[in-house]
Every structure is written in structure tokens, then in C-alpha cells.
Image (cartoon, grey):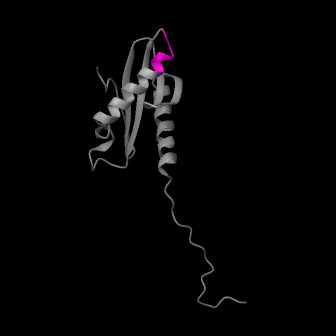
């Protein structure tokens, strides 16, 4: 059967945005590249436990750095840094405690965030203090 003349033979391919997981992985890759360029060393990536998840565990000299990577398309609703609320902070803290239980001689530690708003990347140090 032959297609009618009104049939469009040109296929339109819709623009597909990456899924949330793929977008998050790309943001983590970008943050990791940036931190490596700043002289930090990767210890572990995507540390998961029942208590929470830590995106990147890095070493900055003798200091162990737990890094949360946040990405937002813009700052309309407060931006990436504003999205690290009290509940997320508590999960980060608990996940870090679980990580440190596996390492009996824990070095000095700090919590940093790499916030990506659109194309702007910002590295915030010491975002959690307890």
C-alpha cells in the first residue's frame, strides 16, 4: 500500500532532555573535574548507605572532604545552594558518620558543596558545621 501524498516522509526527532539520573551524573562529572583541577584527590564516589548518600569523597591535603553536588537550571527558586535544606544536611551528616565508621583513624573532615546553577559552577567550602 502506498502512502498518500499528505504523508510526511521527513521524520522529526524530538529534543530529549537527559533524565534526572543522567543529568545528575553529568553534574557530578563536571564537579569532579573541577575539584581535581583544584588539586583535590578522589577517594570514593557515590557512597551509599541506609542513612544517605555522599556524591564525592575527596582529599584536600590531609583533610577528608564530603562533597554534595547540586544542580538547578537557574536561581528562580533559590538555586542549587538553597536546595540543601536541613533534612538533606542531616542525611549528609549521617552518611558521613557511616563512612567514617569504616575508617578507624579518621582525619580532619569538612563538608563542601559544588552548586551548579545553569552554566555557573560554584564551590562552597565548610557548608555544614556541627
Q: Is residue 113 above or below residue 75?
A: above
Membership of 100 in magenta stretch: yes
Nearer to me, 121 or 80 = 80
Q: Quadrant of residue 93?
A: top left
Q: Indicate the position of residue 18 as horizontal and vertical percent values.
A: 51, 53
Q: Quadrant of the N terminus?
A: bottom right
Q: Looking at this view, name the residue that lies furthest to the right.
A: 1
Membership of 47 in magenta stretch: no
Drawn side of residue 102 relative to residue 70, left or right: right
Nearer to me, 78 or 107 = 107
Q: Quadrant of residue 121?
A: top left
Q: Looking at this view, name the residue that lies furthest to the top.
A: 105
Q: Indicate the position of residue 70 as horizontal and vertical percent values.
A: 39, 39
Q: Looking at this view, name the residue that lies furthest to the front.
A: 50
Q: Is residue 1 above or below residue 120?
A: below
Q: Quadrant of the C terminus?
A: top left
Q: Is residue 63 above or below residue 20?
A: above
Residue span colored magenta: 99-104
Q: Is residue 67 above or below residue 13?
A: above
**In the rendered image, is residue 39 in sight?**
no
Amino acid at each position: 500500500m502506498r502512502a498518500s501524498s499528505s504523508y510526511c516522509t521527513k521524520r522529526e526527532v524530538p529534543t530529549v532532555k537527559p533524565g534526572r539520573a543522567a543529568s545528575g551524573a553529568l553534574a557530578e562529572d563536571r564537579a569532579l573535574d573541577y575539584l581535581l583541577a583544584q588539586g583535590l584527590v578522589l577517594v570514593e564516589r557515590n557512597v551509599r548507605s541506609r542513612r544517605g548518600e555522599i556524591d564525592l569523597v575527596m582529599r584536600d591535603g590531609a583533610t577528608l572532604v564530603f562533597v554534595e553536588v547540586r544542580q538547578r537550571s537557574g536561581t528562580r527558586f533559590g538555586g542549587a545552594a538553597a536546595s540543601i535544606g536541613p533534612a538533606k544536611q542531616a542525611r549528609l551528616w549521617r552518611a558521613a558518620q557511616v563512612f567514617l565508621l569504616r575508617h578507624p583513624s579518621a582525619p580532619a573532615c569538612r563538608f563542601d558543596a559544588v552548586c551548579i546553577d545553569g552554566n555557573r559552577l560554584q564551590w562552597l567550602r565548610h557548608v555544614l558545621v556541627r
